[in-house]
Image (spheres, helix red, strand yellow):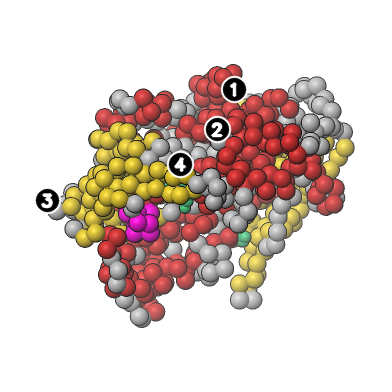
């Protein structure tokens, strides 16, 4: 077994395992001599506690993947951190992701694992699946070859894969099987912090439940923390302790899962919850009016104002700060009134 | 009525394993169904991963030949399409949208190139302005515009944006049938709705039939006319969407339906906790 840094007893007061402060990460590009900046992560601050599952929700191209990539320290140009910091605390040792690159590299897989969006495509097409496990995990686990193989096989079985997949090539497996494999890879070392981008979106509903239960199980057994991204609100409903809602590169609301579903505080969140499809209901749903904002040229003031049914003049000019309210945080000039309604 | 697409007793086997442990995998078994030309519909294929959905789609697109059985498009055997000209005419009428937008576009090529070459190839357009107009029109259908897409690479866009571009590309040739393999699995719920609503409009306004492959039962219920459920290569249930999904009779379709998590934190998290205990 891999010995991870000892677990501190869980308490709400315990030092957060992740602290993101004023994080700005932009894609900086040159288009025919014209500088272009996509402000994909714009001033995000959040903390994640030990033993917590934190879900990030938001529409497509709102910057979810960019945010989580930046937190994972896995960014490549043109994406750059412009301001702010990302700090982990692994067993009392602070790790500043953008100040301590080499230490960060060493923490990969062992303390921290990152499952990218569409990561089912990262498996090397000309090598059997077993080699991927060997490459990524063997040296971190301190097991003999035989023990390692047995461990990997039982782990695969738990996530609903026949261990014989180890002997296959990626192209022989369906998309769902490949996605389960990458989750298997990320969890086989049982790291303290798991970062996952859309970990279950490619899976069918039956497998999805198994994978969600698996993620929850690993998290409970190890006391790990998880930050994951998905646009699928039912996945948040199923496993997240807290949810952060991202709109146009900004965190606009954060709260306990139940609160976010039952008493959304931000008009965008309210829309998101109301638009959820439910079986047995074929009423035509209205999609949110207007276009998703262009992050190269985001709307002024509150970025949601062109699509917001509650917008007032002030919203067009002034950016509402993310402030504590009702056990959570919300960035909306009219949050107080929403509550009254 | 004439058949737009007719599958009769289609089977596909794959040989798997190395030299010593060869075996046969029956990816698709005895699949038959017909779509009528006069009655455009949204025909949904539901099933767990590995159940043979993509393999079926690939055979309909002519990218894979069946081991036995036949697939006919407008009376013609798809496997018998040989000449370049015939192939092009077929592809204009039957357009794919793939599961993973990250796989569908080559990262080294700009996205507008795909759209322009589709317009040139299938619409026979030569004039630059006409090519751009056709491209812009189909991008507008999916809530984008050429101005936003021009010169950009796939990795510069999010998963959802890419998928909308894939739908736009499929619309350019003016197809009769769109085969969409899990087109919304990478897309958020509000966009998901706008894409499936778009399918509905394509059916009603343009008379396009859609084979919608998904494991998202809520959108399946919401837009499908007919549904088949696949399980390990077999069609285990087929019928009107309301009957199959609203009142499933086969054990597997029941399990599939009951596995849909409700968007309710109290119920959904209880289901996962229950599942966890079973491990
Ligand atoms: N390599 C890149 N270069 C330039 N712009 C990029 C790049 N990657 C992403 N972007 C842009 O940054 C914005 C945020 O993208 P991101 O991938 O973070 O979205 P997302 O919220 O994860 O969306 P989805 O749910 O569709 O995956 C988008 O406008 C996207 O076009
Ligand atoms: N090229 C291939 N070689 C061998 N096996 C394959 C190949 N393509 C698919 N399969 C297998 O066929 C079965 C059906 O796969 P697929 O049609 O992709 O399922 P779905 O799309 O329903 O997830 C799976 O067991 C898969 O592993
Ligand atoms: S600040 Fe104004 S525009 Fe923004 S969400 Fe609140 S009411 Fe709507
Ligand atoms: Mg993403
Ligand atoms: Mg598939």
Q: Nearer the viewer, mark 2 or mark 3?
A: 2
Q: Residue at x 27, y 35 (%)?
A: B238
Q: What is the C-alpha distance between the residues marked 3 and 4? A: 34 Å
Q: Please, which chain is the residue tagged with disc 4 on? A: B
Question: Residue at point 58% right, 60% down?
Answer: B155
Q: Which residue is mark 1?
A: B279
Of the two numbered discs 1 and 3 in the rendering, the one whose residue sits closer to the viewer: 1
Left or right: residue B165 versus residue A252 is left
Q: Secondary structure at mark 3?
A: loop
Q: Which residue is mark 3?
A: B1
Secondary structure found at label 2: loop
In the image, A145: left or right of A182? Answer: right
Residue wearing tag 2: A160
Q: Where is B34 relative to A148, above or below? A: below
Give residue A331's position: percent from left, percent from top: 62, 39
Q: Nearer the viewer, residue A81 or A292?
A: A81
> What SS does tag 4 mark?
loop
Q: CA separation, marks 2 and 4?
A: 12 Å
Image quadrant holding the C terminus of chain B, namely top right
Q: Residues within 10 Å of mark 4 (few under 14, many from 20)?
A: many
Q: Which residues are magenta?
A: B58-65
Disc 4 and disc 1 on one polypeptide chain: yes
Q: Say if disc 4 is inside 8 Å of ligand 2.
A: yes
């Amino acid at each position: 077994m891999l010995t991870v840094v000892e677990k501190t007893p869980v308490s709400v007061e315990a030092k957060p395992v992740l602290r993101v402060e004023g994080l700005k990460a932009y894609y900086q590009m040159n288009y025919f001599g014209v500088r272009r900046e996509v402000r994909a992560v714009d001033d995000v601050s959040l903390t994640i506690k030990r033993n917590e599952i934190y879900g990030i929700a938001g529409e497509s191209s709102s910057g979810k993947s960019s945010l989580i990539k930046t937190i994972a320290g896995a960014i490549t140009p043109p994406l750059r951190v412009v301001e702010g910091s990302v700090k982990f605390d692994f067993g009392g040792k602070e790790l500043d992701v953008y100040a301590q690159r080499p230490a960060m590299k060493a923490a990969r897989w062992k303390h921290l694992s990152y499952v990218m969006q569409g990561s089912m495509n990262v498996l090397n097409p000309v090598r059997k699946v077993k080699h991927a496990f060997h490459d990524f995990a063997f040296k971190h686990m301190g097991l003999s070859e035989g023990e390692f193989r047995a461990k990997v096989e039982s782990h695969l079985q738990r996530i609903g894969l026949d261990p014989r997949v180890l002997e296959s090539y990626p192209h022989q497996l369906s998309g769902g099987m490949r996605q389960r494999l990458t989750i298997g890879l990320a969890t086989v070392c049982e790291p303290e912090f798991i970062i996952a981008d859309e970990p279950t979106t490619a899976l069918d509903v039956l497998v999805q439940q198994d994978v969600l239960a698996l993620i929850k199980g690993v998290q409970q057994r190890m006391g790990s923390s998880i930050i994951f991204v998905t646009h699928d609100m039912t996945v948040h409903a199923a496993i997240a302790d807290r949810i952060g809602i991202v709109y146009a590169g900004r965190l606009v609301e954060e709260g306990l899962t139940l609160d976010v579903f039952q008493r959304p505080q931000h008009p965008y969140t309210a829309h998101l919850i109301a638009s959820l499809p439910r079986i047995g209901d074929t009423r035509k749903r209205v999609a949110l009016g207007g276009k998703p904002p262009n992050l190269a040229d985001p709307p002024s003031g509150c970025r949601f104002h062109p699509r917001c049914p509650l917008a007032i003049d002030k919203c067009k000019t002034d950016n509402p700060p993310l402030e504590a309210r009702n056990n959570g945080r919300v960035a909306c000039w009219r949050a107080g009134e929403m509550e009254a309604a | 009525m004439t058949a737009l697409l007719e599958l009769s007793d289609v089977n596909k086997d794959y040989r798997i394993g190395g030299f010593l442990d060869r075996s046969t995998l029956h990816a698709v078994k005895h699949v038959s169904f017909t779509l009528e030309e006069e009655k455009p519909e949204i025909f949904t294929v539901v099933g767990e991963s590995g159940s043979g959905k993509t393999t079926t789609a690939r055979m309909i697109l002519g990218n894979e030949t069946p081991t036995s059985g036949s697939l006919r498009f407008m009376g013609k055997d798809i496997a018998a399409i040989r000449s370049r000209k015939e192939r092009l005419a077929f592809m204009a009428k039957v357009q794919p949208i793939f599961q993973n937008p990250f796989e569908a576009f080559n990262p080294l090529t700009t996205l507008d190139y795909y759209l322009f070459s589709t317009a040139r190839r299938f619409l026979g357009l030569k004039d630059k302005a006409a090519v751009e107009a056709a491209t812009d029109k189909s991008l507008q259908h999916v809530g984008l515009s050429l101005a936003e897409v021009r010169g950009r690479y796939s990795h510069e866009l999010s998963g959802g944006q890419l998928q909308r571009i894939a739908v736009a590309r499929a619309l350019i040739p003016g197809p009769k049938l769109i085969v969409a393999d899990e087109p919304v699995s990478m897309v958020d719920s509000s966009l998901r709705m706008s894409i499936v609503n778009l399918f509905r409009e394509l059916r009603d306004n343009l008379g396009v039939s859609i084979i919608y492959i998904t494991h998202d039962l809520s959108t399946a219920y919401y837009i499908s006319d007919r549904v088949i459920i696949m399980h390990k290569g077999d069609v285990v249930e087929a019928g009107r969407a309301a009957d199959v999904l609203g009142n499933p009779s086969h054990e597997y379709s029941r399990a599939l339906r009951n596995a849909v998590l409700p968007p309710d934190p109290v119920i959904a998290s209880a289901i996962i906790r229950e599942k966890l205990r079973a491990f």
